[in-house]
Amino acid sequence: MLKLIGAVLILISTTMTGFRMARRYAERPRQIRQLRQSLSLLETDIAYGSRTLVEAFRLIGKRERDPVASLFSSCVRYLETLDGASTYQCWKKAVEETWPRTAMGVPEREVMIDFGKTLGLSDRQDQLQHLRMAIANLKVEENHARDEQVRYEKMCKTLGFLAGALLVILMI
C-alpha cells in the first residue's frame, strides 16, 4: 500500500514538474507580446502625448499586467527616489530586478537594456526610432519563443510523466 502511494506521489510530482517547465515555454511568447504592446503604448505617448517619461511609465505600469507592469513601476520608483541617477541606470536596475520573475530570456533582456541606453537622451524622432527598433527586435524574439514553445512544450509535459513512470517502474 505504501509503495502504491509513493508511486502515485512520484508520478504526480514529476508530471507537475514537466507541466511547470512547459508553462514557461508557453508564457515566454505571451510576455514578449505584452512587452511589445507596452512599448507601442510608450511610442504613442512619445509621438502624440505630452507626458513626461515618468508619467508615461506610470500609466503603462497601471495598464499592463505583471511582470511587465512591475518593470515600468519599478523604473518609476527608481526615477523618483534615486537622486542623480540617469534614466538608463534606473531602467537597467528595474530590468535586472524584474527579469528573474519573468519567463523571458537573455535576448529579450538585452534588447530592453539596449533600449534603455537611449531613454531621454535624444529628440522625439530619435526616441521613436529606437522604440521601433526595440519593438522589431522583440518581434523577432517572440517568433523564436513561439518556435521553442511548439518544439518543447509538449515534450516537457511528456518527459515529466515518462520520468515519473520510469522511476515507479525502477522502484517496483
Image (cartoon, rainbow, N blue to C red):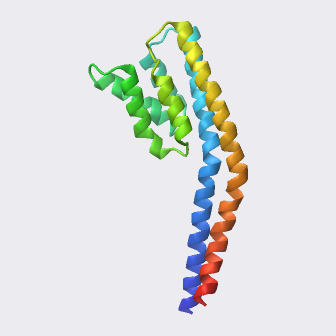
Quarter of the image holding residue 52?
Answer: top left
Name the residue: 62% across, 61% down.
Answer: 19
The C terminus lies in which quarter of the figure? bottom right
Question: 102 or 55, which lies in front?
Answer: 102
Name the residue: 50% across, 8% down.
Answer: 50
Quarter of the image holding residue 49?
Answer: top right
Left or right: residue 14 versus residue 55 is: right
Name the residue: 59% across, 58% down.
Answer: 21
Residue 4, percent across and down? 59, 88
The N terminus lies in which quarter of the figure? bottom right
In this figure, what is the number of numbered marks? 0
Q: Is residue 62 visible?
A: no
Left or right: residue 101 versus residue 32 is: left
Residue 130, percent across and down? 56, 17
Q: Is residue 52 visible?
A: yes
Residue 165, percent across and down? 65, 78
Image height of 24 relative to 143, above or below: below
Question: 90 or 16, which lies in front?
Answer: 90
Image height of 157 relative to 165, above or below: above
Residue 72, percent across and down? 46, 29
Of all residues, the one furthest to the left in this rendering is 83
Image height of 44 relative to 156, above or below: above
